[in-house]
Image (cartoon, rainbow, N blue to C red):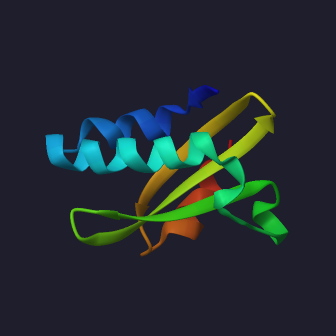
């Protein structure tokens, strides 16, 4: 599985501590093994899927897009607060 990263995703990753990166890596591994695991969004976010996971005991969301059967594009991740608003602004 080929995983592409957006600049928004990379910037958010740089702010994480080591244990948080481990939690994020596990979420990315789950998404890469089963891309259909995330909830498909409708409306303005058509084509985007969101996977919920725990990041240091806090519920976080991971937004991604399935490009084809062999590749996914990780858009962003973060807590639920303002997540969808920010995702609409940076949708890639």
Of 14 and 60, the residue lying toward us: 60
Quadrant for residue 3, please give it: top right
Q: In the current view of this chain or complex, which residue is farthest to the top? A: 2
Q: Front-most of 20 and 69?
A: 69
Residue 33 in picture, x, y percent from top left: 60, 42
At x 62%, y 55%, the residue is 89
**Taking 59 as reference, is 45 left or right?**
right
Q: Is residue 80 above or below residue 90?
A: below
Q: Residue at x 68, y 41 (%)?
A: 92
- Left or right of residue 7: residue 78: left
Q: Position of residue 39 (x, y in %)?
A: 68, 67
Find residue 14 and report its horizontal and vertical position in percent: 27, 35
Q: Image height check: is 30 above or below 87?
A: above
* 67 over 65 or under it: above or below: above
Residue farthest along the bottom direction in this orientation = 81
- Residue 68 x/y as whole percent: 82, 33
Left or right: 76 as drawn, with respect to 73: left
Q: How many marks?
A: 0
Residue at 16% across / 40% down in the picture?
18
Query: Front-most of 25 and 77?
Result: 25
Work out which quarter of the rendered image holds the N terminus and state it: top right
């Amino acid at each position: 599985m080929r995983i592409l990263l957006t600049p928004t995703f990379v910037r958010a990753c740089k702010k994480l501590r080591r244990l948080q990166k481990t939690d994020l890596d596990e979420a990315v591994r789950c998404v890469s093994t089963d891309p259909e695991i995330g909830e498909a969004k409708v409306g303005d976010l058509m084509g985007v899927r969101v996977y919920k996971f725990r990041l240091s005991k806090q519920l976080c969301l991971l937004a991604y897009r399935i490009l084809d059967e062999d590749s996914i594009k990780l858009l962003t991740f973060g807590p639920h607060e303002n997540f969808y608003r920010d995702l609409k602004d940076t949708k890639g």
